[in-house]
Image: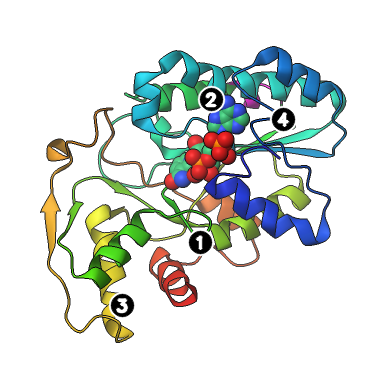
């Protein structure tokens, strides 16, 4: 498993370790930017499933280093996928809702048009396609991941609210969050059930903005008595967020019905997952 120092890989490695032999492949042992070193490491590897959450995940990083983004997010997954197919190993690769084109509001289905405006999205889309060229593999698109493995937007909002600091959030870009505690359960089902093809894995609900996520976070803290008053959350249009230099589409919340059909219990609403996370941490 690659990417185990990252948010998703750390969660997966911890969830699978008790009942599987997890071979962690950190960057020092398996550098996706180095094709020769990668090929040499693959030669020595013996596994049933190769899980690849590693990637160059920052949109601005990918904008600044498009060649590296292409190598790590597109070429390397393709090379791993070809190696895995030759060896009879199944690959579970991770992708993103940033692959979609700018489309009207609504839930994006797996076959909705992809035409990402960012280097990140284009490189991830090429990675998906290279992996899916091998019919036995599985690509899992996730979005807005949060969990205890690494601080995310939710933790930033909680910290600011508890410190009494001003809070602002983009209110015109919509997605759906994925809680790592739920994601690891879903991946377990996909891995053991032999799922193949493209799967969209996020919690359920209507498309939510960062402002919606921030509002749900402070309301929950208020309900639990951790905040005496509800703080005001300033609304920021996407176009005015100066931290974002790479272009982003506004409507990329994913339809998770294919995943829901494979699970005994469909993914819970994102508000329930968020409340659970805030109560646990
Ligand atoms: N988090 C989200 O909200 C989100 C949303 C949509 C899709 N995704 C997708 O989900 C997957 C996992 O994301 P994440 O949130 O876990 O990402 P993350 O926290 O940024 O972790 C990225 C991981 O990739 C590793 N990595 C980066 N470059 C590498 C290289 N050249 N060679 C080997 N390893 C390298 C990093 O290792 P180092 O620690 O050494 O840097 C780290 O372990 C990615 O495919 C991402 O595109 C995530």
Determine the residue positioned at 26% across, 44% down. 105
Q: Which residue is mark 4?
A: 29
Where residue 224 sits in the image (x, y, percent)? 33, 85
**How many numbered marks have been drawn onto this rendered protein structure?**
4
Q: Is residue 234 visible?
A: yes
Q: Quadrant of the N terminus?
A: top right
- Residue 73 is tagged as 2
Say which label, 4 or 3, has the lower sequence index.
Answer: 4
Write down the region rendered in magenta: 130-134
Say which label, 4 or 1, has the lower sequence index.
Answer: 4
Q: Is mark 2 within 8 Å of ligand 1?
A: yes
Q: Which residue is mark 3?
A: 221
Depth check, front residue: 48 or 72: 72
Foreground: disc 1 or disc 2: 1
Q: Is residue 114 visible?
A: no
Depth check, front residue: 72 or 106: 72
Is residue 132 magenta-colored?
yes
């Amino acid at each position: 498993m690659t990417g185990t120092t990252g948010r998703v890989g750390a969660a997966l490695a911890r969830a699978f370790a008790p009942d599987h032999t997890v071979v962690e492949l950190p960057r020092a042992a398996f550098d996706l930017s180095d094709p020769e070193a990668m090929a040499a490491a693959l030669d020595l590897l013996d596994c049933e499933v190769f899980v690849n959450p590693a990637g160059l995940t920052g949109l601005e990083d990918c904008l600044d280093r498009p060649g590296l983004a292409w190598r790590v997010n597109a070429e390397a997954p393709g090379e791993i996928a070809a190696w895995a197919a030759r060896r009879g190993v199944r690959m579970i690769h991770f992708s993103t809702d940033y692959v979609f084109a700018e489309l009207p509001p609504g839930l994006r289905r797996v076959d909705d048009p992809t035409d990402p405006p960012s280097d990140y999205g284009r490189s991830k889309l090429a990675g998906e396609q290279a992996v899916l060229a091998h019919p036995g593999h599985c690509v899992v698109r996730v979005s807005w991941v949060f969990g205890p493995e690494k601080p995310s937007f939710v933790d930033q909002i909680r910290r600011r609210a508890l410190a009494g600091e001003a809070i602002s959030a983009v209110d015109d870009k919509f997605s759906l969050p994925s809680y790592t505690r739920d994601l690891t359960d879903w991946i377990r089902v996909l891995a053991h059930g032999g799922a193949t093809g493209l799967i969209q894995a996020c919690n359920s609900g209507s498309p939510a903005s960062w402002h919606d996520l921030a509002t749900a976070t402070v309301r929950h803290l208020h309900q639990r008595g951790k905040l005496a008053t509800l703080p005001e959350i300033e609304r920021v249009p996407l176009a005015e967020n100066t931290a974002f230099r790479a272009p982003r589409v506004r409507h990329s919340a994913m339809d998770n019905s294919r995943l829901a059909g494979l699970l005994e219990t469909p993914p819970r609403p994102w508000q329930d997952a968020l409340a659970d996370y805030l109560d646990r941490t």
